[in-house]
Amino acid sequence: MLELKSIRKTFHDPAGGDWVLAGDLSLTVQAGETVAILGPSGTGKSTLLKIVAGLEPLDAGSVWFAEKDITPEPPERRGFALMFQDFALFPHLDVVDNVAFGLVEQRIKRGEARQRALDMLDLFGLTAHARQKVWKLSGGEQQRVALARALITQPRLLLLDEPFSALDAELRSGLRDEFSYRIKAAGIPALLVTHDEAEALAMAQRGYRLVSGKLITLW
């Protein structure tokens, strides 16, 4: 379970004045649960994800996971996976090596990593694309590759930053259902930030709106 305890974060504008991203903000996300945080661009949703991931320092408060304070831990020791709206795939690698990348980084032998990646691609119906370069895939296929790459490392938490915003409406609808199924099947907590309330309602069991550093309960 992820727990944010009394998180505070303020940005100082050189032109004068402060912008409160988080003011005594607290939140929990259970295993297998997706929680959505909504709000327009510029409200600090993505920065909040970076705080959880350890990529952005906080002013006060703490980040806990599995009843342990992980606030001092660097990103690479948290075991979290962060997915971006631009997929962040490696264009010089084929599909199977993109999915296997995280395992290779964990010092798993390349042959074993590729076999596990092929098994994961089979689950996602992407086996036929294993040796293709990712830039040859459709947007929806690329996003499924990105999810496969995130899940293969068995992350303790999945952080989703506007994951479908670059896709058309019909494709978004199908992918958010697939993502919801995969996240529940993996039994991991997930934190989704989005400006799309329909997307949040389709994927998340709980939803909040980030307003002036506070979380307002939506459902």
Image: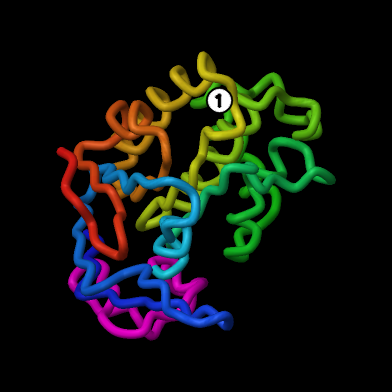
Residue for point 47% across, 65% down: 50
Q: Is residue 199 visible?
A: yes
Q: Quadrant of the C terminus?
A: top left
> Residue 134 appears at what percent x and percent y?
75, 34
> Circle 1 is placed at which residue position?
122
Residue for point 51% across, 39% down: 163
User: Is 68 in front, or is 175?
Assistant: 175
Quarter of the figure with residue 15: bottom right
User: Is 200 in front, or is 70?
Assistant: 200
Amino acid on which the number 1 mark rests in the picture: Asp
> Residue 109 appears at what percent x and percent y?
66, 57
- Rendered view: 51 above or below 69: above
**For residue 87: magenta?**
no
Residue for point 48% across, 74% down: 56
- Please provide the residue range marked out in magenta: 52-79
Q: What is the crowding at mark 1: few (fewer than 14 residues within 10 Å), some, or many (at least 20)?
A: few
- Rendered view: 46 above or below 180: below
Q: Quadrant of the N terminus?
A: bottom left
Q: Is residue 116 visible?
A: no
